[in-house]
Structure formats: structure tokens, C-alpha cells
């Protein structure tokens, strides 16, 4: 029990999100944990209460949104270890692309010159997932290849497809065989089998079924691509995500080699970024790591974040559904900072 962490979540729920789970591990052991709220609170965008409002639990499952990019990165690095691809080869070796100068490294550092996003569901409303993916891979470059930095979901979609071609398997299978099975993450993956444990996200009247989205990916592009994409679509519990972060903190084993994790967390020199950037991860981004300067990690649009601080032996997970029932709710940044401050306190107490 951690009364300070409980108070932080109590202040945020339901103002910022309807459900929140946070775990703080110091030197591999959970030093603080807290759970608050309800997996479903609203029936629609107008704030009408849901008929059934199951409580959030420590083993509840959340849509990780862009934290999925770290799983795609891990798969690509593992495939590079296996000799199936090279981070500095042209992506045209594996997939069609608008510019043969683009490499997987460009994609993982958001310096490929590709646009931030592409609403392929609106462009091709009647197409199947395969047709939409083919169109995504042909997205033209709109900025110089090699920089400056431009955060791009399109680039990470391409990265996921490269993994599929190089690994000769669908991305969800690659994430399972190269990451989740290796680490024993039983509740992590694309397209969760049981929505009963999943936190609801946004009200989307264009989706089939009543109520807010629950148990399927929130991101529109990932949904249009069948629920599996390189930039979004992975769901996980806080415990599983903590184990993933701990694997990175400890040097990667058995998921990745220490050399791969060192390269992943090395400043790749992405010019124009408001923070230093590794492969797939943000280094010292204050919007993600808060007061944990020197840490690395990623956040997700749904209200999630993973922070790894090797120097302080810390791994911090915050899972919320801050887009329930609508996006744009205020306060997720302050919540991340408050949790980071409590993690810093936990690390200091452990010294």
C-alpha cells in the first residue's frame, strides 16, 4: 500500500480518466502500486453513466496506443540480431517505398521524412486491410530524408510491415514469438480475447456495437489495418508492461542482447527533436519522464506511459484511459509528472 500514490490517483480519477493503474519498481521489486476507478464509466460522449461499471484491478488490460512502437522496435532489433534485416539498409529491400534512401533506422528515429499520420480509413473507406496497408507503404515523403525529426505513425506502420516481411510472419505473431512468450507476458498482445478485463476508451459512433470502444484498438489507422500495426494496437496489463520495461533496464535478456538495448537507448542524433531520441524510445523527454531526468520511455495517446531509469534502477508504469469517453481531457501530463515524482521518492528511499 502506498498512500501517497493512492492520493495521486484519487485526485485524477475520474477527472482525468475513469481508470488508472500504476506500478513503481525499484531494483526489480515493486515498491509502490495503486489502482483506482472503473473500467467503464460512461455510456457515450455526453457523460451518461454506463449501466455496468466494473472496477479497475491491478490485472486490468489497457490499450497501450503508441507504447506499441516499443514492441515493434524490439521485434526489429531481434530480427537484426538474427541477420534477417539491417537497420541501415534501404527499406525497399523488404517493402515498396516512395524513397529508396529510407532505412529502418530512419523509421525508428522518425527521420524518414514521412508525414505524421494518414487517415487511410477515410481515404479508402471501402477497402480491405491489405489494400490499405499497400497504400500506406506508398505514402510519399514530405520532408527531407534523414531529418529533421517528424514524429510519424506512418513510418512505424512501415516498420511493422518490414518486420513482417523480414520475419516471414504477421506482426502479432512476431511480437508473441520474439517478445511476449520470451518474457512470459500472458496478457500482452494485439486484439485481446476477452474485453471484460479491458478499460474502455473513446465514444466512436462509427464503430459497430453499443457504447464506447472496448476490447478493440482505439487508434483509427490501426483499426483500419485490421487491429495490428507497427504504431498502435498492443494491449497489456501494468504487470506485463513493467516486466517488459524491466527486461530493457536489465540489458534486454532474454528478449534482446545487451548490445541491441545499448543501441536502442543511445542518442541517435535526430536533429530538430525537442528531446534526445533513441531507436523507438524518447530519451529524457520531460513530457514522459517528468522529474526522472536521464530516463527513457514512451507515452500513448490513450493515457499510458512507460519510463525506464537505469541509473536509479527504476521502472515506472502508468496505464489510464484518459480518452474515455472523449479525447482532449486535461491533466494527463500532470498525472505523469506526479507519478514520476513519487517514483523518484521511492528510489531515494531505497538508497
Image (cartoon, rainbow, N blue to C red):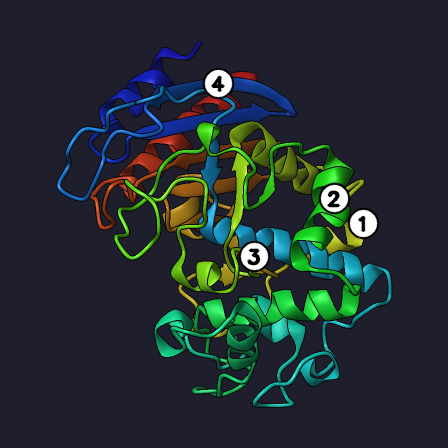
Q: How crowded is mark 3: few (under 14 residues within 10 Å), some or many (20 or more)?
A: many
Q: Tag 2, which secondary structure?
A: loop
In this rendered view, identify the residue nearer to me: 306 or 241: 241
Cα–Cα span, label 1 and label 4: 29 Å
Quick one: label 1 or label 2, which is nearer the N terminus?
2
Q: Tag 4, which secondary structure?
A: strand
Q: Which of marks 3 and 2 is in front?
A: 3
Cα–Cα span, label 2 and label 4: 23 Å
Q: Are marks 3 and 2 in contact (CB under 8 Å)?
A: no
Q: Nearer the viewer, mark 4 or mark 3?
A: 3
Q: Name the residue under label 3.
A: 228
Q: Tag 3, which secondary structure?
A: loop
Where residue 232 is drawn, which disc sits there? none
Cα–Cα span, label 3 and label 2: 24 Å
Q: Residues within 10 Å of mark 4 (few under 14, many from 20)?
A: many
Where residue 32 is drawn, which disc sits there? 4
Quick one: label 2 or label 4, which is nearer the N terminus?
4
Q: Name the residue under label 2.
A: 252
Amino acid at each position: 500500500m502506498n498512500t501517497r500514490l493512492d492520493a495521486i490517483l484519487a485526485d485524477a480519477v475520474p477527472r482525468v480518466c475513469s481508470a488508472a493503474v500504476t506500478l513503481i519498481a525499484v531494483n526489480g521489486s515493486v515498491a509502490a502500486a495503486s489502482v483506482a476507478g472503473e473500467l467503464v464509466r460512461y455510456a457515450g460522449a455526453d457523460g451518461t453513466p454506463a449501466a455496468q461499471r466494473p472496477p479497475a484491478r491491478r490485472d486490468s488490460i489497457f490499450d497501450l496506443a503508441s507504447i506499441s512502437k516499443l514492441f515493434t522496435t524490439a521485434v526489429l532489433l531481434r530480427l537484426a540480431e538474427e541477420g534477417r534485416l539491417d537497420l541501415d539498409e534501404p527499406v525497399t529491400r523488404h517493402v515498396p517505398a516512395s524513397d529508396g534512401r529510407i532505412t529502418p533506422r530512419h523509421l525508428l528515429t522518425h527521420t524518414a521524412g514521412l508525414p505524421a499520420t494518414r487517415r487511410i480509413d477515410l481515404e479508402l473507406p471501402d477497402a480491405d486491410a491489405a489494400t490499405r496497408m499497400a497504400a500506406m507503404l506508398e505514402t510519399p515523403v514530405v520532408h527531407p530524408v534523414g531529418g529533421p525529426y517528424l514524429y510519424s505513425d506512418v513510418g512505424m506502420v512501415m516498420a511493422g510491415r518490414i518486420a513482417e516481411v523480414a520475419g516471414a510472419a504477421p506482426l502479432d505473431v512476431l511480437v508473441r514469438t520474439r517478445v511476449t512468450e520470451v518474457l512470459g507476458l500472458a496478457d500482452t498482445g494485439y486484439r485481446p480475447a476477452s474485453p471484460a478485463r479491458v478499460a474502455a476508451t473513446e465514444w466512436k459512433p462509427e464503430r459497430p456495437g453499443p457504447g464506447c470502444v472496448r476490447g478493440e484498438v482505439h487508434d483509427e489507422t490501426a483499426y483500419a489495418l485490421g487491429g495490428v500495426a507497427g504504431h498502435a494496437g498492443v494491449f497489456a496489463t501494468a504487470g506485463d508492461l513493467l516486466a517488459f520495461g524491466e527486461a530493457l533496464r536489465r540489458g534486454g535478456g532474454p528478449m534482446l542482447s545487451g548490445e541491441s538495448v545499448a543501441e536502442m537507448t543511445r542518442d541517435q542524433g535526430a536533429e530538430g527533436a525537442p528531446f534526445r531520441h533513441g531507436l523507438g524510445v524518447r530519451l529524457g523527454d520531460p513530457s514522459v519522464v517528468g522529474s526522472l531526468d536521464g530516463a527513457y520511455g514512451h507515452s500513448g495517446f490513450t493515457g499510458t506511459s512507460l519510463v525506464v531509469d537505469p541509473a536509479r534502477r527504476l521502472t515506472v508504469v502508468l496505464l489510464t484511459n484518459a480518452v474515455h469517453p472523449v479525447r482532449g481531457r486535461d491533466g494527463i501530463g500532470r498525472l505523469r509528472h506526479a507519478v514520476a515524482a513519487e517514483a523518484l521518492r521511492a528510489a531515494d528511499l531505497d538508497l
